[in-house]
Amino acid sequence: MRLQCFVLLLLAALVSVASSTSRAATSGILVTVQLKDRAPVEWPVYGGGPESMRYSSLAQINRDNVRHLKVAWTFDASDGQQGSELEVNPIVVNGILYATTVSLNAIALDAATGALRWRFDPYHGRHVRGGGGRTRGVVYWGEGQDQRIFVAVHQFLYALDARTGHPIATFGDSGRIDLRDGLRPGEKLMVSLGTPGIVYKDLLIIGSRTAESLPTPPGDVRAYDVRTGALRWTFHTIPRPLELGYETWPKDAWTYSGAANNWAGMSLDVRRGLVFVPTGSAADDYYGANRVGDDLFANSLIALNAETGERVWHFQFVRHDIWDRDLPAPPNLVTVQRDGRPIDAVVQITKSGHVFMFERTTGTPLFPIRYRRYPPSDVQGEVTADSQPLPIAPEPFARQQLTEEMLTDRTPEAHRAVLERFRALRSGGQFIPGSLRGTVVFPGLDGGAEWGGAAFDPETSMLYVNANEMAWTVTLSEARPAATATAGGNELYAQHCAGCHGVDRRGSPPTYPSLLDLADRLTMAEISAVMSDGSGRMPGFARLGPEALTAMQRYILTGESSPPGPLSLRERGDVVRDPIEQRYNSHVERFLDPDGYPAVKPPWGTLSAIDLSTGRYVWNTPLGEYRELAARGMTGTGCENYGGPVVTAGGLVFIGATNYDGKVRAFDKATGALLWETTLPASGNATPATYEVNGRQFVVIATSGGKARTQAPASYVAFALDQPPGR
């Protein structure tokens, strides 16, 4: 009996020490007692875990000591290039950090020192100019000695040995599978994987990145066997005959329509075996006469049985989207309190600046949703939905309608120029159709919320979300029927390229890059390949034929035009209008003042904290600023930002994201007070990761100059305390 009492007292003392250690670390006291041989806290999945909460239980770095953070290590991920984008959220497993470089080399680093363990170069040492593309991370799977890293390089998905970086020969075709296979009978169109998939048991479940205008593949969600690469199931986001939602599209749409894809990533309820898949709009983004109907499952959150791919429930956020209102990030799987009881929920943030919350197993809304009617389109052939859903609570975390009173007053000249432009546009808030005169989309095409996602704190039920408050414009123009056109390079460019890259070929960086001096960045072979096959959100134009491609390329590179001869779509010149041909082209651009600053009054970027149990805002603060404006006394404006927050048990919210000041910051998660900031080598347009190795907590973030249009090399920068508590 005495022995039992002694054991109970000893266990109680150990529990008390562990509890005190956690509480003390959270409150900022430097703790000297640590439990030996405890398991490290790592970052094994994109977003921190399958629930996509972007939360860490680590508390070594806390409110009181965060000001002592120093650079622990850096790693050059630029591959000798300047000004590329690096948006990766690294993962950390077994003390190794896995990520990619700007040329899509997969890398494994010692997570404590940043030393390179291995590098997988899919190009076998061939120098790739202009970057290898964009990806936001990799996937880990392991069972015993079989440990794998999955990385996407354009249309290929590779399985690598996590210890060596060598392709696993028994996976697919000598270590890789072609993501174009099986998407739809017929031509293989360009597809890639921008955001990593997610693992359930022995399945790797993935979405895709497709072009945003036709022709482009459908956005099928697919599950592959992690060992063999065999396709195990497919969910068609553009339904086929006899499938749910087929009646919401034209009857043959599944044969030619595309996108409705999951490019943002997904979340997984491991216990229930449910995978939550947010999708984007169908192609074309801004004109949908060839996809009349609600277009289910575009712009939807789909709960699928992770084992079989069968739909459990869904909710469509935008019917017949013509505003590019993709769901931009994986949803957060959270637990909130309602009427004194816990409810497992799924939370989806949107580009329009809204938070939707549903019961996780049934899809029942946990905040009321109201369907509102909006004006119909006055553009020939376009048929908009009669109503769209928006939540009544929480209130939007971004402003909803641009008015004259909100236009910039940075200088009188800027105000006059912006006011004149604004009065020529349509501006009526959410879901106002595109027009020939131009329509304001606010928040803009990049949000509101973006791909960095939101962070959720399970200790407090608080959701942290950063937002852009930029206005964009969408202007439609009548297109010439390509099947009968005889056009020069300038006309072909105007029809197929100017909508994104501008009539002056200057683009709208970073979303739509400038084409001026393109030959200084890419080889001629690379330019031809991109124009033919497409890349990222850009479709390929191989269907126009080699003569048309040559004429377009000549005009892009030299400004000189020459006719290629008669054009035909799919060699069917006698067809008046092909199903994929659009009657209108779209031109989209940021609404800026003459000096290149946002046309709207600040804040231009924000960070908000929302109590999900009540739907109330706890705090909101501008995020970022422009260095040159701050030097002239215009501070605290906020600025465009990409990449999301991470919240920790140490009482902190870490976030980089800001384009134009290149900083990473730590805020008090309870009050929003800024506790620490430092300037990075380049903008931290990525979501950080935090992890512990050898008893030391690190915070790491990818940095790059692409979105800020600076010629800075990309790198990973890790921070830690000089003298961690207990050392």
Image: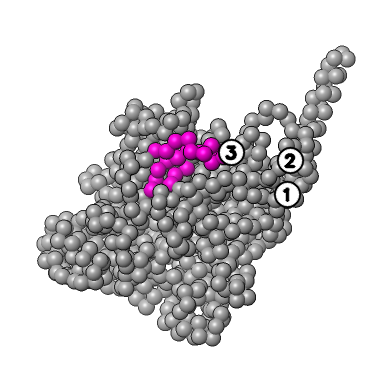
> Which residue type carries mark 2?
Pro
Label 1 CA crowd tier, 10 Å (few <14, some 14–19, many 20+)? some
Q: Looking at the image, is mark 1 or mark 3 earlier in the sequence?
A: 1
Residue 253 seen: no
* Residue 100 percent location from the top left of the image: 44, 44
Q: Are marks 2 and 1 in contact (CB under 8 Å)?
A: yes
Where 333 falls versus 479 (above or below)? above
Left or right of residue 18, residue 264 in this image: left
Measuring 60% from the left and 72% from the top, which residue is drawn there? 630
Q: Tell me where the magenta segment starts and ends, as one range.
A: 99-120
Q: Is 101 colored magenta in this rendering?
A: yes
At mark 1, the secondary structure is: loop
In this figure, which residue is indicated by the disc labeled 1? Answer: 65
At mark 3, the secondary structure is: loop
In this figure, which residue is indicated by the disc labeled 3? Answer: 112
Identify the image quadrant of the C terminus: top right
**Quarter where residue 224 is shown:** top left
> Which residue type carries mark 3?
Ala
* Residue 583 percent location from the top left of the image: 26, 68
* Alpha carbon separation for disc pair 2 and 3: 16 Å
In this figure, which residue is indicated by the disc labeled 2? Answer: 725
> Which residue type carries mark 1?
Asn
Residue 498 seen: yes
> Toward the viewer: 203 or 58?
58
Measuring 78% from the left and 37% from the top, which residue is drawn there? 32
Q: Are marks 1 and 3 in contact (CB under 8 Å)?
A: no
> Toward the viewer: 84 or 271?
84
Q: Name the residue furthest right.
A: 2
